Image (spheres, coloured by chain):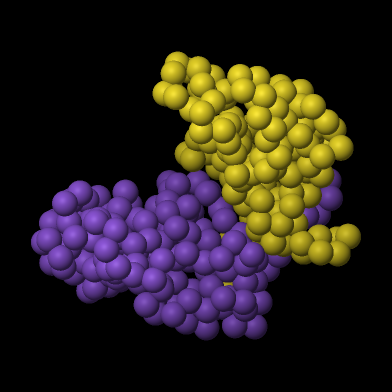
Chain colours: A purple, B yellow
Amino acid sequence: MPKNYMKVERIEHGTVIDHILPSRAFDVLRVLRLSSDRSMSILVNTHSKKGGKKDILKFEDVELSAEEANLVALVSPQATINYIVDGKVARKFQAETPKVVRGILTCSNPNCISNQNEPITTEFKKVSDEDQRYVCSYCERDIVDLVNRIGARSANE
Amino acid sequence: MPKNYMKVERIEHGTVIDHILPSRAFDVLRVLRLSSDRSMSILVNTHSKKGGKKDILKFEDVELSAEEANLVALVSPQATINYIVDGKVARKFQAETPKVVRGILTCSNPNCISNQNEPITTEFKKVSDEDQRYVCSYCERDIVDLVNRIGARSANE
């Protein structure tokens, strides 16, 4: 069997997002909106050492900003972000949901001004750490099901 | 560095789709419509031994039917399908575009009966091997840009 069927190239520099909820890697990609010409590996429903399943994302030569990394928590709260330098984990931290989210989520209220084709960037503010509740800054609608609200809505699109 | 950052588990049984055009792995997934609770690895823009870049898809414990495998050629004509049994390549072949495609592509003609919310499954027939031309069985519209026509349209959806 050719070698490349067995292994993925080791990342020398880049970012590894580990402990993503199973099947959520695609939602993480949607939230990060990285261009698809990047080098990346996506492991979906792979076995976790702790038991159960998880997803892993590896981006070569990409260092996510803390702001980008925290967006991951919107769709997978337990994810860890690892920066790889010279083949080693140089820094590791757990993604935390951001206080404010702009231009990433869409409001579920069809009458919200952000859904009226106005030149408006959506904005949601976190109201509770416990249950990941966000509220629309325009109409104050509660957004609970964040995964289903991913969709760019910003003024310059 | 933890081991799991360096390698992907070897597939013992399953299907490896190799030599996918760079950045086309996601289109291959859309065309195959496998459920997202599968175990899979997706390598995007990885280095090819022949030079250049390619994508690779590995599905654990999935044996694609010849019919499914050939759908891959709609979005990545040079892709090869490898069936892995007991860790070895048991069979290998190149995907070939199917003669008829049902329920996978949508017609680009807005007036086509298949776009009128009728209980109809889309159907396209291959007219030319050279340039991957398909023609709608209902309105005879030529479909050239297949990647942008992926979208389920079948009678029972």
Q: Is residue B74 above or below residue A96?
A: above
Which of the pair A139/A117 is nearer the observer?
A117
Expressed as whole percent of the image width and height from the top left, the position of residue A72 reads 38, 65
Residue shown at the point (76%, 34%) measured from the top left: B133
Name the foreground residue: A63 vs B124: B124
What residue do we see at 78% from left, 55% from top?
A: A4
**Residue B62: image location, x then y, percent:** 63, 32
Measured along the vertical axis of the image, is residue B77 above or below residue B104?
Answer: below
- Residue A118 in the figure: left or right of residue A90: left
Asked whether residue B33 is in view, the answer is no
Depicted A62 relative to depicted A31: above or below: below
Q: Is residue B48 left or right of residue B137?
A: right
Quadrant occupied by the N terminus of chain B: bottom right
Residue for point 72% across, 23% down = B125
Q: How many marks?
A: 0
Q: Residue furthest front?
A: B111
Q: Position of residue A17 (x, y in %)?
A: 48, 66
Q: Of residues A85 and B50, which is closer to you in this image?
A: B50
- State the image quarter where residue B88 is shown: top right
Picture residue at 66% right of the left edge, 56% below the top: B23
Is residue A55 visible in the rendered image? The answer is yes
Question: In the depicted view, which residue is nearer to us: B98 or A120?
Answer: A120
Name the image quarter holding the C terminus of chain B. top left
* Residue A148 in the figure: left or right of residue B77: left
